[in-house]
Image (cartoon, rainbow, N blue to C red):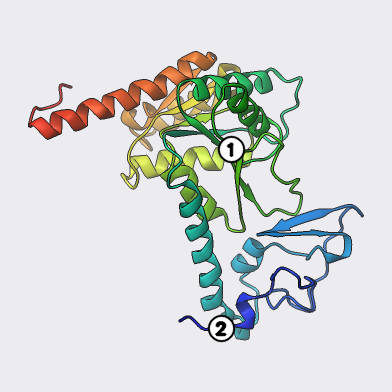
Amino acid sequence: MVPVSAHDTDEQPGHTTDVARDPEVRPDEKPASRAPDAERRSGPLMMRRGKVPPTTTDQRLLDRGQPTDWLHADPWRVMRIQSEFVEGFGALAELGPAVSVFGSARTRAADPAYAMGVEVGRLLAEAGYAVITGGGPGAMEAANKGALLGGGTSVGLGIELPFETGLNEYVDLGVNFRYFFARKTMFLKYSHGFIVLPGGFGTLDELFEAVTLAQTRKVTQFPVVLMGTGYWQGLMGWLRDTALAGGMIGEDDLDRLQLTDDPGEAVAAVQAHEMSDAAAEAAGATGVERPE
């Protein structure tokens, strides 16, 4: 039986959560300025106003400026990290075929990218895929909405952030995470492909992590489709004319990315890759070499 320490019980249901009660929040930390109606979700807890801690769990983990005595709390953080993996694996293990859709939380409902996200989500659901997003507003909400319209399973993997708004109303199955790396593992492990709508740093982070892991063969390769030629063609041009031309990446690395404006084409790319994988597995089972 694993012993329980105060370092691992700072956010128990029924207990107040503030700077004085949270062993991961140093007394000398000053709360960041926030709106009076600010809301924070941390695991199963929801906190508002004066109960919102000044930092996130991820921020405290990555803080290099902690006094050395705080290093002794790290083993207990590992227990919390482990619990996130256990909860995520347990929630998603029987999800079935799924595709992750990424995009900006700032995408407005009137933006063409929002309509694109709804259509992508709908077509994926009609094709038999669950739709996984970050569970937030904007493009994520659009894809979750489309999944519901298509009669599919709509999944949201939320993250604890200072400005988080909670899971959007179209999420059927939601899992909240404190740590980005645990959340990213779920996207990668349970997806048959990534469809990437216009987005910012978070979207780029998820995009390039997937491409890097495929490049280094850390994950089974799967299609990565960029939706919106007008938005992504500048990045694709830089990758081709600068990174590829300079020998920093290979032609096969660039081939991992597909670019389209057509939601149907994006879904077809995922389906084609899945059929190709099935054919390869069948060929391997019968000892027949797969044609190039």
Q: Kindly identify the residue that appears in the image at 52 percent across and 41 percent down.
A: 206
Q: Mark 1 points at which residue?
A: 203
Q: Which residue is depicted at the point 72% across and 74% down?
A: 25
Residue placed most toward the observer, 121 or 152: 152
Residue 170's x, y, as percent? Answer: 67, 34
For marks 1 and 2 on the same chain, the one whose residue lies earlier in the sequence: 2
- x and y percentages locating residue 113 in the rendered image: 66, 21
- Residue 245 visible (yes or no): no
In this picture, residue 229 sits left or right of residue 39: left
At label 1, which amino acid type do we have? Thr
Disc 1 and disc 2: Cα gap in Å? 34 Å
- Tell me where residue 217 appears, x and y as whole percent: 31, 44
- Residue 210 appears in the picture as rendered: yes
Vertical arrangement, residue 151 with respect to residue 161, above or below: above
Residue at mark 2: 72
Comparing 269 with 11, the one in front is 11
Q: Is mark 1 on a helix, strand or loop?
A: helix
Query: Which mark, residue 75?
Result: none
Residue type at the position of mark 2: His
Q: In which quarter of the image is the N terminus?
A: bottom left
Is disc 1 surrounded by few (<14), some (14 to 19) or many (20+) residues within 10 Å?
Answer: some
Look at the numbered disc 2 and give the secondary structure of its residue: helix
Nearest the viewer among 241 and 160 is 160
Residue 142 quadrant = top right
Above-or-below relation of 19 to 251: below
Is residue 266 shown left or right of residue 161? left
* 231 to the left or right of 162: left
**Seen from this angle, which residue lies furthest left?**
287
Check contact, mark 1 vs mark 2: CB within 8 A.
no
Name above or below for residue 242 compared with residue 61: above
Quadrant location, the C terminus: top left
Snapshot quadrant of residue 138: top right
